[in-house]
Amino acid sequence: MTRTPHWGITLRQAALIAGFAYLLDPVTYAEFALYPKLVIPGHIDQTVANITAHGGTFVAMILCYFINFIEDIVIAWALYVLLAPVNRALSLLAAWLRMIYATLAIAGTLNLVIAYRAVTTPEYATLFGPGPLRAQVDLLLHSFRYEYAFILIIFGIHLCLLGYLMFRSDYTGWISKIVGVLLLIPGIGWIVYELGPYLYPAANLDWLFYTFFGELVFMLWLLIAGWRIKEPA
């Protein structure tokens, strides 16, 4: 019989919870389908018109971000349980970093909520006038992007810790070590990429996008190899 640890779930269950949370994450849909459709960079008039005409789509986008960040909290908890046998202190630190990232991201998403209310509430257009109202919406949309981008540095540090813990684990032998290295790469990638506008604004860092597929490999490991994880003696 599989022993259940004091936190209520087995390592196998923790891996599968984290894996399915990754799998059901809607942030990719929000980032690459909904947001580019509604928010046109450099064209705030068109953006406001899009939000006005497709308010339901904008709300769906906000919900996708919100669900994503709630899932990040669940993933942080599940990965803590999974990696605590490797190093409890570092696993706890990694979990806290992801929870801090998710909390700050939820707070940043409120910029989108305020922007939506500003566009869809007729009184604001009367109080501010069309020009100032568009400027306010533009500021809110940019605030969301700036805040989200900057806190991804915290997420990158979290991934680096996960990579180290996976490398030190022996759940699936050498496969765990490969997954650990593949997590370190996107962790460093997020840190370097998001610091770019502040430290080296002239550098072209678009190639770093290809380093982020390490998380996809980690998700597959959780879902596939997660069934094979055994409780420590």
Image: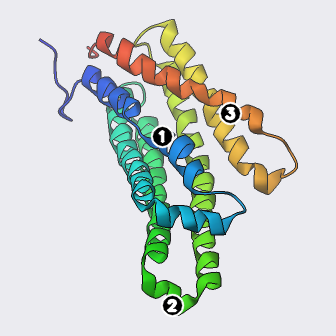
- Mark in the foreground, 3 or 2: 2
Residue 84 shows in the view: no
Q: Residues within 10 Å of mark 2 (few under 14, many from 20)?
A: few
| Quarter placement of the N terminus | top left
| Residue 191 in picture, x, y percent from top left | 67, 43
| Residue 111 in picture, x, y percent from top left | 50, 67
Q: Residues within 10 Å of mark 1 (few under 14, many from 20)?
A: few
CA separation, marks 2 and 1?
34 Å
Instruction: Kindly give the residue lying farthest to the top in the view shown.
Output: 173
Question: Which residue is painted at 32% across and 34% down in the image?
Answer: 78
* SS of the residue under disc 1: helix
Which of marks 2 and 3 precedes in the sequence? 2
Check residue 209 in the rendering and tell me which mark sits there, or answer none: 3
Give the labeled residue for mark 1: 29
Give the labeled residue for mark 2: 126
Which of marks 3 and 1 precedes in the sequence? 1
Amino acid type, residue under disc 1 in the picture:
Tyr
Amino acid type, residue under disc 2 in the picture:
Thr
**Residue 214 placement, left or right of 113:** right
Question: Which residue is painted at 65% across and 57% down in the image?
Answer: 40
Confirm or deny contact between disc 2 and disc 1 (CB under 8 A). Answer: no
Amino acid type, residue under disc 3 in the picture:
Phe
* SS of the residue under disc 3: helix
Q: Quadrant of residue 7?
A: top left
Confirm or deny contact between disc 3 and disc 2 (CB under 8 A). Answer: no
30 and 175: which is toward the camera: 30
| Quarter placement of the C terminus | top left
| Residue 143 in picture, x, y percent from top left | 60, 66
CA separation, marks 3 and 2?
43 Å
